[in-house]
Image (cartoon, rainbow, N blue to C red):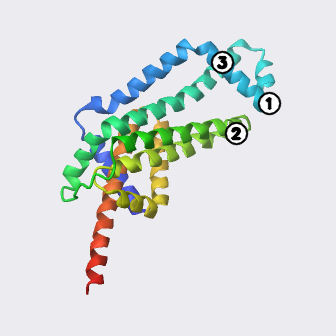
């Protein structure tokens, strides 16, 4: 588990050492602009769909019975944010994963793992497919667990969803340039619990004001550090096992 905390510390160091702030901010700004634009244009349609969904789960009448206009409007706005917020997170993470990761991998690898040979076990197609799969499951988690908000335990949903999204999305991309397919599978299998912990810890940053602007890049850096460190360890272990088998 120490590898998780080493990855987080290394990510913080690299995050505040980056000179180009635009790399950090533009994925989030693009996502916010896009989804708030969609929300503004389709506000009424989105409200209708939400109330239909709440009728299905049995709380539509309770919401419709609210007599105080400002309270009803506040609840409606909160529900819109509850839907748009995860979409912003998904979009930002996907943009970071597909378009920003190569530059971050080069930054980390050149500085910390210059001796690590590149096997190129992944590619753009695999990254896109993985991103679509991760985002699809992320959305399902939010939809399936919406009733939990009605009974007061919905606050756990964002953390579980963020942990899943981060580890599913970035574990592949962090290794795709340096590991071959077998090594990617081995690193993920051997570190599945640590990857979930790293996903949860990096996901917490998404819910801290101001720091959440840096969350996507920080998450990417943390998974790159963790993935490359584990890949280096795996190759050293395989080399040692090979030597011992020939003795």
Could you say which disc has been placed on residue 58 in the image?
1
Disc on the earlier residue, 3 or 2: 3
Q: Picture quarter containing residue 195?
A: bottom left
Under circle 2, the secondary element is: helix
Q: Does residue 46 appear to the left or right of 181 in the view shown?
A: right
Q: CA distance from mark 3 to mark 2?
A: 19 Å
Q: Residue at x 71, y 27 (%)?
A: 53
Label 1: element kind: loop
How far apart in space, not on screen, are marks 1 and 2 (Cα)?
12 Å
Lateral position of residue 138 relative to residue 231, left or right = right
Residue at the (36%, 46%) spot, across then down: 173
Residue furthest to the front in view is: 125
In three-dimensional space, the C-alpha distance between marks 1 and 3, rounded to whole angstroms, equals: 16 Å
Of badges 1 and 2, the one in the foreground is 1
Q: Can the viewer see residue 203? A: yes
Residue situated in front as seen by the camera: 209 or 159: 159
Q: Nearer the viewer, mark 3 or mark 2?
A: 3
Badge 3, how many Cα within 10 Å: few under 14, some, many 20+? Answer: some
Identify which residue is drawn at 77% across, 29% down: 56
Name the spot of residue 41 as percent of width and height, x first: 54, 12
- Give the farthest residue toward the bottom: 247
Q: Mark 1 vs mark 2: which is more N-terminal? A: 1
| Crowdedness near tag 2: few (<14), some (14–19) or many (≥20) residues, C-alpha within 10 Å | some
Q: Is residue 226 above or below residue 156?
A: below
Q: Secondary structure at mark 3?
A: helix
In the image, residue 223 lies at what x, y percent?
A: 37, 50
Question: Which residue bears the numbered disc 2?
Answer: 148
Q: How many marks?
A: 3
Task: State which quarter of the image contains the N terminus.
Answer: bottom left
Dot 1 crowding, Cα within 10 Å, few <14, some 14–19, many 20+: few
Q: Which residue is mark 3?
A: 47
**Which quadrant of the view contains residue 241?**
bottom left
């Amino acid at each position: 588990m120490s590898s998780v905390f080493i990855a987080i510390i290394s990510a913080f160091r690299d995050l505040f050492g980056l000179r180009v702030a635009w790399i950090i901010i533009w994925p989030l700004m693009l996502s916010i602009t896009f989804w708030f634009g969609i929300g503004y244009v389709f506000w009424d349609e989105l409200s209708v769909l939400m109330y239909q969904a709440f009728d299905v789960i049995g709380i539509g009448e309770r919401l419709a019975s609210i007599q105080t206009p400002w309270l009803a409007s506040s609840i409606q706005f909160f529900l819109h944010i509850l839907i748009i917020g995860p979409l912003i997170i998904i979009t930002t993470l996907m943009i970071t994963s597909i378009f920003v990761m190569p530059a971050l991998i080069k930054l980390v690898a050149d500085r910390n793992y210059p001796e690590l040979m590149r096997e190129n076990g992944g590619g753009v197609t695999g990254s896109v497919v993985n991103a679509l799969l991760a985002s699809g499951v992320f959305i399902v988690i939010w939809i399936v667990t919406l009733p939990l908000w009605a009974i007061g335990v919905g606050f756990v949903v964002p953390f579980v969803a963020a942990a899943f999204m981060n580890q599913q999305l970035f574990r592949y991309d962090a290794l795709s340039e340096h590991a071959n397919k077998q090594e990617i599978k081995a690193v993920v299998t051997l570190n599945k619990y640590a990857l979930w912990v790293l996903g949860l810890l990096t996901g917490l940053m998404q819910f801290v004001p101001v720091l959440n602007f840096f969350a996507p890049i920080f998450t990417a850096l943390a998974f790159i550090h963790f993935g490359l460190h584990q890949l280096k360890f795996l190759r050293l272990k395989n080399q040692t096992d090979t030597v011992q088998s020939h003795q």
